[in-house]
Image (cartoon, rainbow, N blue to C red):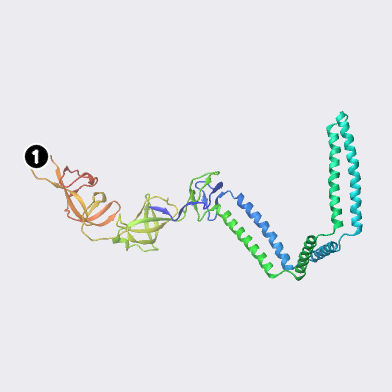
Amino acid sequence: MIEAERTSELSFEQPGLLMALQVEEGAAIAPGEIIARLDTRQLEAQRSGLLAQRDQARAVLSELENGPRQETIAATQAQLAQEKARLRELQTGPRSENIDAAGSRVQDLQEQLELAQLQTQRRQALYQEGAISQEQFDQVATQEDSIQARLGAARSELEELQTGTRPEQIQAQQAQVQAVRSQLDELVAGTRREQIEAQQAQIQQIEAQIAEIEILIEKNILRAPFPGTVSLRYLDEGTVVSPGQAVVRLVEDSRLKARIGVPPSVISRLTPGRQYPVEVNGDTYDATVLSILPELDSATRTQTAILALPPTVVPGAIARLEIDRSQSTEGYWLPTSALVRGERGLWACYALVAIPGPEEELPRGTAQIERRTVEVLYTEGDRSLVRGMLQPGDQVVKTGTQQFVPGQFVRGVEES
């Protein structure tokens, strides 16, 4: 049997939607050529996000390695001065001008509230008389509520200024000053080594995630593992593919080989690397012996020789190896179909034995089936060389041996 060097049912490792199938049946494919693609849009979006994170992390690492910029230090120094001034103000208490200003705001809002209340009373009377609409009355009432809220806030601020700063406010501001001072000290002293190493580790982690995404994207692309021809296309675009589901069948038809069973008695005549004639569909080709398998086939009792054939033959065809040899032995050539299995690994055939007697008792040409044990010496195609309990001129059953039993009466027919 002639077969291709390699034949594969190509499939994806990952499930997904088949977006593109780029080959047709009969197409010649080069190794590495893209055959099909799954939908990778979600994976590509994840990769884009990770690439952005990596760029940002690299920028932070560059800043850590180069140290803080002067404008960053200056801005932190200004923030520290501002926080210190706020702390001093809390510790010394509010200034008199701040209290006077807060008192003036309270008095001003009190006067505005009285005026608003008077306007509300007037508008309410007009509304009850039907002189104004509900909306006009609501506008005045809303303005009164707003002034009332602002007056409450101003009174609270004035009260806080008059009673002084509470201790918890001072403690909170002291903590804020300390935090800004620590930040400034760190900027002036430079970045610590462990911060740089931590940032480098973060970048490595992101790059590992990117590499994993790229591997998944590559697994969603089906490539030809070897050169060959697409013999079958199982799916079409739009199919949801399962892992291991065959997409196409790829056959490496540029390198063909034949597996031929050879009798052990002649296998030694074959030499790996040498060429021998092989017949395929009536044509003869020079085939090179690649290897000889060491074990006997349990069914045919032959050894398998593997031969390389030219790419002009077709996979699946039957090949016949021609080996010339001379063998001096006594025996008879029988059709292989005439052999039946015997005992202890031997073979047998059914011979026709003439029955003597008056012709009126049995029809002319009647014979009786007799089982004859034989030894198979050599098999060549559909015939076998045997020796055993046969004599020159014996007739044997050629085909259909399963239809006969020893002792059965038959009439023999000479083969023309």
Looking at the picture, tell me which residue is in the foreground, 6 or 195: 195
Looking at the picture, tell me which residue is in the foreground, 322 or 137: 137
Looking at the picture, tell me which residue is in the foreground, 67 or 91: 91
Looking at the image, the residue that sits furthest to the front is 163
Circle 1: element type: loop
For mark 1, does the 10 Å Cα neighbourhood hold few (<14), some (14 to 19), or many (20 or more) residues? few
Residue 244: x, y in percent? Answer: 49, 51
Query: Mark 1 — residue?
Result: 361
In the rendered image, the quadrant that contains the C terminus is top left
Looking at the picture, tell me which residue is in the foreground, 54 or 284: 54
Image-quadrant location for residue 299 = bottom left
Looking at the image, the residue that sits furthest to the left is 358
Residue lying at 67% horizontally and 59% vertically, measured from the top left: 54
Amino acid tagged 1: Glu
Residue lying at 84% horizontally and 55% vertically, measured from the top left: 160
Res. 416 visible in picture: no
Residue 169: x, y in percent? Answer: 79, 60
Residue 344: x, y in percent? Answer: 21, 57
Image-quadrant location for residue 267 = bottom left
Would residue 403 be found to the left or right of residue 144 on screen? left
Would residue 64 be found to the left or right of residue 385 on screen? right
Res. 83 visible in picture: yes
Residue lying at 66% horizontally and 54% vertically, measured from the top left: 49
Residue 107: x, y in percent? Answer: 91, 49
